[in-house]
Image: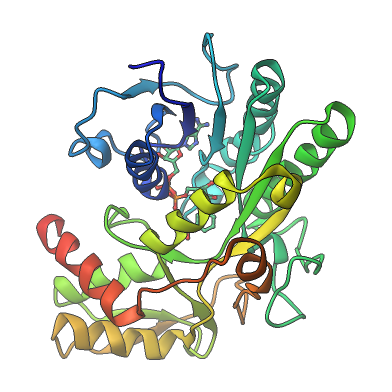
Amino acid sequence: MSKDRPHAVVTGGGGFVGSHLTESLLDANRRVTVLDNFGSGRPENLASVESDHLEVREHDICDPLPAFTDVDELYHFASRASPEDFASHAVEIALTNSEGTRNILDAAREHEAKAILASTSEIYGDPDVHPQHEQYNGNVNIRGPRAPYDEGKRFSEALAVAYEQQYGIDVRTVRIFNTYGPRMRTDDGRVIPNFLTQALTDEDLTVYGDGTQTRSFCYVSDLVRGILAVADAPPDRVAGEAINLGSTDEIEIRALAARVLNVVETDAALTYESLPQDDPSQRRPDITKAKELLEWEPKVTLEEGLRRTLEEFRKRV
Ligand SMILES: NC(=O)c1ccc[n+]([C@@H]2O[C@H](COP(=O)([O-])OP(=O)(O)OC[C@H]3O[C@@H](n4cnc5c(N)ncnc54)[C@H](O)[C@@H]3O)[C@@H](O)[C@H]2O)c1
């Protein structure tokens, strides 16, 4: 790996978002070290990335980082994010977002590097403010089944604030709203991979609740463009900030199901199951801050994003 390029460490770089982020960082002239335990990620996600500037290491981020001579940027994207894993991997998720975040922040301190933390719209819980802006403190059930993830991410942000206050390090937090795209696990459990996999195997699409709950879906290339804009912005604009990144194109889940059926060109039916506990009923980011600070907004339409995702899913399902 050439030392001429800034060195970025990406935790979770073998996952869905992390692998796209890694590719974009390499394109943006960084050298990248991926640290991933490959719990939910897959080495294949990086198989097509051919670069002399990439190193992939199997490493659990709950352990201190390997010794590096220099680090310029730390991207903390490790964490299972699928609701399917919230019960079976509850402790791992909570620790990845606490011990793991601590290890990242210690490394940021040691190397005087900037840290970019992946937070989530789940920190707003089942929101009673709509759309959700960054000043909203959220409505999270601290003892519910989603708590290890939701509260884990809230603690991750709180720990970042503590390090900023006490040690003056540069941490930038992205609050990611539902994002989808190629390389998501087909058995991921999140709604778009679920629907695509079911539609491609001629199964009925499973809708939880009556399907009137809403989400807004951001295509992964738009998200990654936003993450890089956050990383590249001058510190006086974004250091210490939490910034929503997501699509404002809100859609009911039953309407999303209809769009998927249309894109896949199948006439499968919908089946309905009960809504999981604490499932948010409405979800849409207020992205005014990202627009003002970064001139960022999503560009890829849901139709186009679904087509691109479908193309890649067809090869795997
Ligand atoms: N995709 C979304 O819609 C979305 C929304 C909000 C937030 N996020 C956040 O973005 C990040 C990436 O999510 P994703 O959707 O790509 O999920 P993913 O499961 O595809 O990726 C997570 C990656 O982290 C790795 N990982 C998990 N725990 C680890 C640990 N302890 N040590 C090392 N590696 C570990 C996994 O193996 C995987 O490669 C997560 O922090 C997630 O909370 C994603």
Q: Which of these two is toward me, 285 or 52? A: 52
Pinpoint residue 24: horizontal percent, then vertical percent. 36, 45
Q: Quadrant of residue 35?
A: top left
Residue depicted at 31% across the width and 65% down the height: 193
On-image quarter of the N terminus: top left
Query: In the displayed structure, does residue 139 sit left or right of residue 103?
Result: right
Residue depicted at 66% across the width and 59% down the height: 243
Query: In the displayed structure, does residue 185 sit left or right of residue 218?
Result: left
Residue 35 shows up from this direction: yes
On-image quarter of the C terminus: bottom left
Q: Which of these two is toward me, 53 or 175? A: 53
Residue 83 shows up from this direction: no
- Above-or-below relation of 193 to 236: below
Pinpoint residue 298: horizontal percent, then vertical percent. 46, 71
Residue depicted at 33% across the width and 85% down the height: 257
Pinpoint residue 98: horizontal percent, then vertical percent. 69, 35
Colour option used: rainbow
Residue depicted at 54% across the width and 80% down the height: 248
Q: Which of these two is toward me, 207 or 50? A: 50
Pinpoint residue 43: horizontal percent, then vertical percent. 27, 33
